[in-house]
């Protein structure tokens, strides 16, 4: 009977230990899924926005350079509109995935900066189509740079928040797996 009790105690301890290990593994798995399916995609989407903003800036510059050739100018304007569409698609994926108040506030800053950037693009298109290259150049250099910088700052703030959340999640996972 002592042998049976000892064996029963060891089996019970093994079951408890196995249950605790299973729980810790499930918790670690959930945290990894959160990183891979929530936080990393958000960082990638924000990078996509930034790349598209750079494409827009480049296309607007190229449209200005091609003002003497309406076909080339319109092709660059079309590229700008295409990049705008890419940003819209990313925003539509990203916005509903933001749950924290800080994330929602950062997204509002992005949307406000985006609206100002789009208004500026439309103003440049109007100047270009009217053949006002000097005015378009001045607006591009003086006003659009500020709007692009504000846009980049807004996306950077949300990227920084996501990096912070990723780091915190990693630290919690490391503590729980230790």
Image (tube, rainbow, N blue to C red):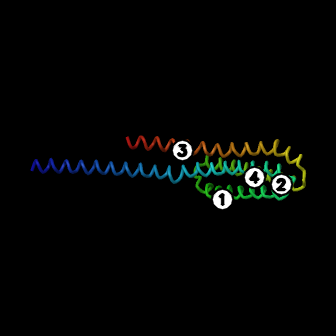
Q: In the image, is residue 121 above or below residue 173?
A: below
3 or 2: tag closer to the N-terminus: 2
User: Dot 3, crowdedness within 10 Å: few (<14), some or many (≥20)?
Assistant: some
Q: Return the residue nearer the eye: 133 or 114.
A: 133
4 or 3: tag closer to the N-terminus: 4
Cα–Cα span, label 4 and label 3: 27 Å
3 or 1: tag closer to the N-terminus: 1
Residue indicated by mark 1: 89
Q: Position of residue 9 (x, y in %)?
A: 19, 48
Which numbered disc, 3 or 1, marks the residue closer to the eye? Answer: 1
Q: Position of residue 124 (x, y in %)?
A: 83, 51
Q: Residue at x 71, y 46 (%)?
A: 151
- In the image, taking residue 158 as reference, residue 146 lies left or right, namely right
Cα–Cα span, label 1 and label 4: 15 Å
1 or 4: tag closer to the N-terminus: 1
Cα–Cα span, label 3 and label 1: 24 Å
Q: Return the residue nearer the eye: 105 or 115.
A: 115
User: Dot 2, crowdedness within 10 Å: few (<14), some or many (≥20)?
Assistant: many
2 or 4: tag closer to the N-terminus: 4
Q: Return the residue nearer the eye: 84 or 129.
A: 129
- In the image, taking residue 47 as reference, residue 145 lies left or right, namely right
Label 2 close to label 4 by CB (< 8 Å):
no
Residue indicated by mark 3: 165
| Residue 74 circle label | none
Q: In the image, is residue 81 above or below residue 142?
A: below
Label 2 close to label 1 by CB (< 8 Å):
no
Q: Residue at x 17, y 51 (%)?
A: 8
Residue indicated by mark 2: 125
Q: Residue at x 59, y 52 (%)?
A: 98
Cα–Cα span, label 2 and label 4: 15 Å
Residue indicated by mark 4: 115
User: Dot 1, crowdedness within 10 Å: few (<14), some or many (≥20)?
Assistant: few
């Amino acid at each position: 009977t002592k042998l049976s009790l000892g064996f029963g105690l060891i089996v019970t301890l093994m079951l408890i230990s196995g249950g605790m290990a299973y729980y810790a593994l499930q918790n670690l798995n959930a945290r990894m899924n959160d990183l891979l399916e929530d936080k990393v995609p958000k960082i990638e989407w924000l990078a996509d926005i930034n790349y598209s903003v750079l494409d827009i800036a480049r296309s607007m510059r190229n449209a200005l350079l091609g003002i003497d050739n309406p076909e080339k100018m319109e092709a660059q304007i079309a590229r700008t509109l295409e990049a705008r569409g890419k940003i819209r698609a990313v925003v539509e994926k990203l916005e509903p995935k933001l749950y924290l108040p800080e994330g929602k506030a950062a997204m509002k800053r992005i949307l406000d900066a985006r609206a100002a950037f789009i208004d500026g693009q439309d103003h440049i298109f109007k100047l270009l189509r009217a053949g006002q290259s000097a005015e378009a150049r001045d607006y591009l250099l003086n006003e659009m740079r500020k709007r692009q910088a504000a846009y980049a700052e807004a996306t950077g703030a949300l990227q920084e928040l996501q990096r912070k959340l990723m780091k915190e999640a990693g630290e919690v996972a490391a503590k729980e797996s230790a």
